Image (spheres, rainbow, N blue to C red):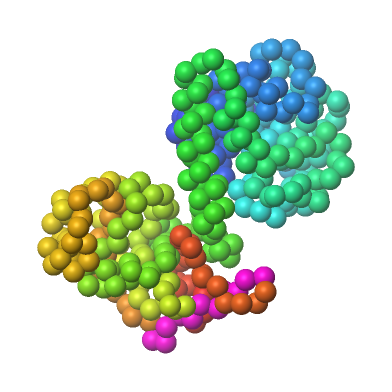
């Protein structure tokens, strides 16, 4: 078995995949919090002893759980995490099941599903938690340690940025395989009721400061049930700045759009129009009743290749 000590990994993450970054951050917290935090989070396991060892990316034959927590050889907890729903892989699960050979070993799946995935029901020493449960328990944990409290708060922020905002409330369209799209090919799609006109006339997009977006080279707006324009993002976004301090924003913008602007901070993308879609990309997104609904309430992502060829939003 190949083992990587979590203490040798940066707490800020050394993995390119979002799923691995979130899992590594959780393992770091458990490494620091120790046996007390582990038993608090995984109370359904019978865990003796009091000194733990935490590893990430454990390899054994055909099985590679995202992490393992062990304690003086008295128990081993394997962690497998998912950050999208309905993501249990049957072959992977069958390989993981082979790790559980005695009563001191457990496999815990952590996923964003609202109920336990049916594939995990009734399996020997295999438990399930969703990310909301994990975060709720971490919020309530009192370790009487200011550093641990800081680490937990930082983990929750990461969870909100990666699991909740990107893959939960906002929702990535699954077929985008967005983690595998290079930054220079990634397109952010946001609602554009007012933003599209501002981008066209004044060449920028502004939103609340420090709002999380995956890195991308392009931006488009879904407005009036269509996507009509594609913009290139110029430079890196400015996370928090007064619009008055952006020289590219002309004074006429404030006269026409925000005459009472007081300088409150915004996150700003400078944009350059590069394409008008003819025909427009039609929004064919529907709700459970078959009625057309908004393609995105906040943001979604796709690739440059897909948006260049799409005729409907279902193709993005």
User: Residue 154: where, in percent of width, then height?
Assistant: 47, 32
The magenta region covers: 278-288
Q: Is residue 286 magenta?
A: yes
Which residue is at a point 30% across and 61% down the rendered structure image?
Answer: 205
Image-based side of 230 in relation to 286, left or right: left
Q: Quadrant of residue 53?
A: top right
Vertical side of 293 occupied by 38: above or below: above
Q: Residue furthest top?
A: 50
User: Residue 69: where, in percent of width, then height?
Assistant: 67, 25
Q: Is residue 53 magenta?
A: no
Q: Residue furthest front?
A: 260
Image-based side of 107 in relation to 200, left or right: right
Is residue 174 visible in this depiction of the protein? yes
Which residue is at a point 67% across and 42% down the rendered structure image?
Answer: 130
Vertical side of 152 occupied by 270: above or below: below
User: Residue 275: where, in percent of width, then height?
Assistant: 32, 77
In which quadrant will I find the N terminus? top right
Vertical side of 54 occupied by 136: above or below: below
Which residue is at a point 34% across and 51% down the rendered structure image?
Answer: 208
Is residue 310 visible in this depiction of the protein? no
Which one is in front, 232 or 144?
A: 144
User: Residue 91: where, in percent of width, then height?
Assistant: 77, 51
């Amino acid at each position: 078995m190949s083992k990587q000590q979590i203490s040798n990994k940066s707490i800020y993450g050394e993995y390119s995949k979002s799923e691995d970054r979130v899992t590594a951050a959780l393992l770091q917290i458990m490494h620091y919090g120790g046996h007390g935090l582990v038993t608090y989070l995984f109370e359904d396991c019978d865990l003796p002893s009091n000194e733990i060892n935490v590893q990430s990316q454990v390899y054994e034959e055909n099985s590679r759980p995202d992490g393992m927590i062990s304690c003086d050889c008295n128990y081993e907890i394997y962690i497998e995490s998912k950050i999208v729903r309905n993501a249990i892989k049957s072959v992977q699960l069958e390989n993981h099941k082979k790790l559980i050979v005695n009563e001191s070993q457990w496999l815990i799946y952590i996923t964003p599903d609202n109920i336990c995935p049916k594939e995990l029901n009734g399996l020997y020493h295999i438990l399930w938690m969703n990310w909301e449960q994990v975060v709720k328990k971490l919020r309530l944990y009192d370790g009487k340690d200011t550093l641990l409290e800081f680490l937990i708060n930082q983990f929750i922020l990461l969870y909100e940025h990666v699991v909740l905002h990107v893959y939960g409330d906002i929702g990535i369209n699954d077929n985008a395989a967005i983690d595998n799209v290079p930054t220079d090919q990634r397109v952010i799609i946001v609602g554009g009721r007012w933003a599209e006109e501002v981008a066209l006339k004044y060449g920028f997009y502004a939103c609340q400061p420090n709002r999380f977006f995956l890195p991308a080279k392009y931006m488009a707006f879904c407005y009036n049930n269509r996507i009509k324009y594609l913009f290139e993002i110029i430079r890196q976004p400015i996370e928090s700045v007064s619009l008055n301090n952006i020289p590219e924003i002309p004074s006429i913008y404030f006269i026409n759009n925000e005459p009472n602007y007081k300088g409150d901070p915004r996150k700003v993308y400078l944009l350059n129009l590069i394409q008008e879609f003819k025909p427009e990309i039609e929004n064919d997104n529907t709700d459970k009743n078959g009625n057309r609904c908004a393609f995105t309430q906040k943001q979604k992502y796709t690739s440059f290749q897909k948006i260049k060829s799409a005729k409907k939003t279902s193709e993005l």
